[in-house]
Image (tube, helix red, strand yellow):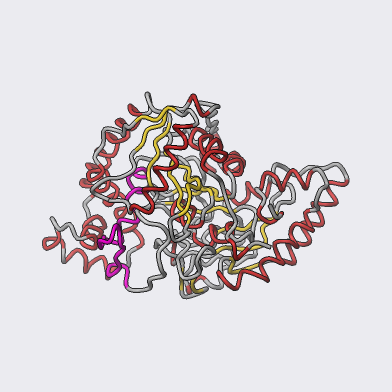
Amino acid sequence: MEIAFKSASELVEMILSNQISSSDLLEVYIDRYEKYNGKINAIITTSFDKARLKAKKADSALKNGEKWGALHGLPITIKDNLEVIDMPCTSGSPSLKNHFPVKNADLVQRLLDQGAIIFGKTNLPLFGDDVQTHNKVFGQTNNPWNLDRTPGGSSGGTAAALAAGLTALDIGNDIGGSIRTPASFCGVYGHKPSFGIVPDRGMIPPMPKLFKGEYSLPTDIAVSGPLARSADDLDLALSIIVSPELPDKKAWRIQLPDARKTSLTEFKIGIWLDDPTCPVDSSVGDCLQNSVDALAKAGAIILDKKPAVSFEESWEIFIKALNGTMSAGVPDGLFEKWLSKESKIQDSQDYQNRQISGSIQRHREWKINDFKRQILREKWAEYFKEIDVLLCPVTPIAAFPHDHTPWFDRMITVNNQERPYSDLMGWAGVTNVVYLPATIAPSGFTPEGLPVGIQIVGPYLEDRTPIQLARLMKDIVGGFEPPDDFRG
């Protein structure tokens, strides 16, 4: 495989063993940026000159016997809602196009401390709030597998850059599938960590300069995590970015356990491949079933068993939790308008009305919903006493055509039937609301040649268990493949 498409783990090893210099590897990615980025618009700001200087220092350090860390000299990109010193951080908002941070996001600093070299920022929708990637500052990002299709969102630029071989590693965020959907749509790996194990200080929103000291504003459900071209890379990046929030470091440490199992034949794998509340298109379902069949043939223990939870109830709890969290960013005037509609939308099942209802809920209602969430968490924990991981869809469909119509007017097509656009968050929300880790691994292609990922859900804080299964699946199901139009 061409060097640009090698995994970050392989590239670091090549740098450390003098098979390639950090400077030469950086030039590979700069050349590819100039050749290919215009097609997909994945990397939207660059810092080539500073990256070149740092790459030279990395090479000199290595010659002097110094190793900076686990990512020594590795050129990487970062999603444009994570702050990096002296690089614009817009979160897709015109109001932030001239925002140049004076400090790094905590997780960014951890990557830099391990020797990473950041040479660019990747695109996202406005404040990361869409399942597609386009904004008024930098425009639309296209999927490397089909330029007429979205790479997903909100970490769409991240996944597209990795799939096209424009970067070695990147970090995204996820509240309703924003790591998992782009990973699936672009055929790369992604990991949504357990909630609360990766610091989010330096992520936008909230708007910059509100929190200038140790503290930040943790957002319920939201997490940051890696996207990459291999499961090994997910493990490597996760081991670096996992940390308590800064004030908690005075007393707390996080030590994630090893994977439950080492070999495929030891794994007890549950499956939940479809549900009437959020039906899955056959083109996606067939890929998932083929992966399950291949795992069974290879000796994995497959159990047709899902947790004792209702998709419909879990989805409702997720919607209330998500919109209760997101409501903090709603302008006062709009919020007052929503309050005036409260009596009319109380029992509506329309997604827009459910969003409004979740946004204006009383604190008592939020607490009741959170109580229900804890019961769901108990049921999932009980399930994982017997089962090691659960396999389920990421989204009901593969990458779909770009759609810039108003959010609530959009629909998707599943098995020739129109379904709500919000279904795209269904399978992500049901697992995310209960704070569980989930790894996305490539799982084949639809008849149209679009990638499909499979969601591997693990027990809370046992992030390395789903990553391990993703690692073992590579030789059975197939791993990352470069898109044809971006080879060479």
Which of the pair 441/465 is nearer the observer? 441
**In what quadrant of the picture does the C terminus appear?**
bottom right
Question: Toward which corner of the image does residue 67 lie, by quadrant?
Answer: top right
Residue 369 location (% of width, % of height): 24, 43
Residue 418 location (% of width, % of height): 25, 63
- Identify which residue is drawn at 49% across, 53% down: 183
Which of the pair 399/14 is nearer the observer? 399
Q: Is residue 171 left or right of residue 384?
A: right
Question: Toward which corner of the image does residue 98 lie, by quadrant?
Answer: bottom right
- In the rendered image, is residue 117 in sight? no
Residue 142 location (% of width, % of height): 50, 68
Inspect the magenta stretch and tell me whether residue 173 lies in it.
no
Vertical placement of residue 277 versus 197, above or below? below
- Identify which residue is drawn at 71% across, 54% down: 3
- In the rendered image, is residue 79 in sight? yes
Inspect the magenta stretch and tell me whether residue 416 lies in it.
yes
Q: Which residues are magenta?
A: 406-433
- Identify which residue is drawn at 43% across, 35% down: 458
Vertical placement of residue 201 versus 166, above or below? above
Q: Is residue 64 left or right of residue 310?
A: right
In the displayed image of the protein, which residue is found farthest to the right?
64
Which of the pair 473/375 is nearer the observer? 473
Residue 301 location (% of width, % of height): 42, 27
Looking at the rendered structure, the number of numbered marks drawn on it comes to 0
Q: Is residue 302 left or right of residue 483?
A: left
